[in-house]
Image (cartoon, rainbow, N blue to C red):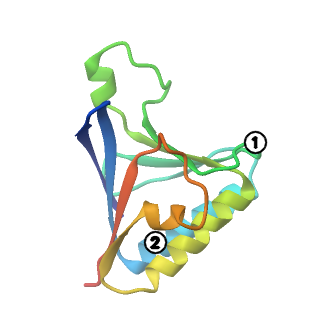
Amino acid sequence: MRIEARQMFRPNGLIDDLVVYGKPEDYLLFADYLGKAVSSEEPISMASESDIVVEITREEAKAELFTSLQNEQNEYFSFDDWNNRTILRIYGSGSVLSALQSFLRDLAGRGNGYSYISEYSERYSYARNSPEWRLHVEIT
């Protein structure tokens, strides 16, 4: 799985835009990691083919899915700090992470094409200040 982080200009400033590329088995593996996070007290990390690591944390107080591209400390003292974010953090309650897990499993079974995380948000709550994701399924 490969993750690209892009920035989009909006009237209220720059926002993150994430593009994920993977084969069906990559999305199934991602879904498995979400399942591990649901039953873990600690964050679960998943490497990608890019410089971005996915870190999934179950927080029962999070009633909606929240995602954010961050650095290790989530502190930004310079523009370089901001431009060198390499951790895609995903937060949600067990039920929220399970819903994302189901969404990714469904996505893996659709075949070649892409979807947006906004499709997830049609049925489940996705934090408004989280980035947009475009999820490409590649069959080779």
| Residue that appears at 26% across and 37% down | 10
Is 19 left or right of 104, judged from the image as shown?
Answer: left
Q: Quadrant of the C terminus?
A: bottom left
Dot 1: element = loop
| Residue that appears at 37% across and 39% down | 86
- Image position of 75 with respect to 23: above or below: above
Type of amino acid at the residue the image marks with label 2:
Tyr
Residue 72 at what x, y percent from top left?
A: 48, 29
Q: What residue sits right under mark 1 in the picture?
A: 61
Q: What residue sits right under mark 2 in the picture?
A: 27
Q: Quadrant of the N terminus?
A: bottom left
Cα–Cα gap, marks 1 and 2: 26 Å
Q: Are marks 1 and 2 in contact (CB under 8 Å)?
A: no
Residue 98 at what x, y percent from top left?
A: 67, 65
| Residue that appears at 50% across and 24% down | 73
Q: Which mark is residue 115?
A: none
